[in-house]
Amino acid sequence: MNSIYIDRHGHAMTRQEVHGLPAEALAERSGIPLHILPGREALYEAIADVMIEVIHANNTRGAKTTLILPVGPVGQYPVFARKVGERGGD
């Protein structure tokens, strides 16, 4: 399949061209917000932080939180549990 992708500047690229972009170029050309992290552990930390921020913001407003979460890899869950424990009842 030779899909055409359009970057945020309106330039068309094939799948092969997209896959060949260096990380910095991919982040710069992406049409959606894209954060490139140095490794898995940084990714798990970032996901856990987002989960905590969303839950805390909703709790502050008295709103219910619903998250759609991945079932694998699951390295963010122990990080999330640790961070929640460190925060105490916040």
Image (cartoon, rainbow, N blue to C red):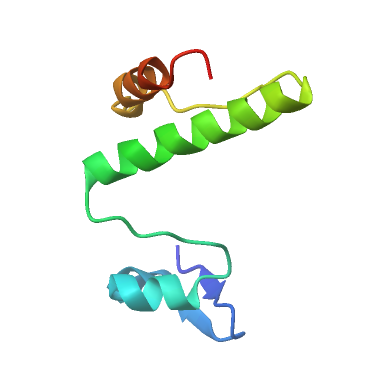
Give whichever of 74, 1 is nearer the camera. Answer: 74
Q: Residue 85: percent from the left, percent from the top? A: 37, 15
Q: Is 24 positioned to the left or the right of 67 in the image?
A: left
Residue drawn at x 47%, y 61% as measured from the top left: 34
Residue drawn at x 60%, y 26% as measured from the top left: 55
Residue 41 shows in the view: yes
Q: Is 4 positioned to the left or the right of 26 in the image?
A: right
Image height check: is 44 above or below 26? above
Q: Residue 53: percent from the left, percent from the top? A: 55, 35
Give whichever of 10, 45 is nearer the camera. Answer: 45
Q: Residue 69: percent from the left, percent from the top? A: 50, 26
Residue drawn at x 39%, y 42% as measured from the top left: 46
Quadrant of residue 31 in the image?
bottom right
Residue 17 shows in the view: no
Image height check: is 53 above or below 80? below
Q: Residue lying at the far right in this picture: please name it.
A: 62
Residue drawn at x 30%, y 55% as measured from the top left: 37
Quadrant of residue 15 in the image?
bottom left
Give whichever of 19, 68 is nearer the camera. Answer: 68
The quadrant of the rendering that contains the N terminus is bottom left
Give whichever of 34, 72 is nearer the camera. Answer: 34
Number of dots carrying numbers? 0
Q: Residue 14: percent from the left, percent from the top? A: 44, 75
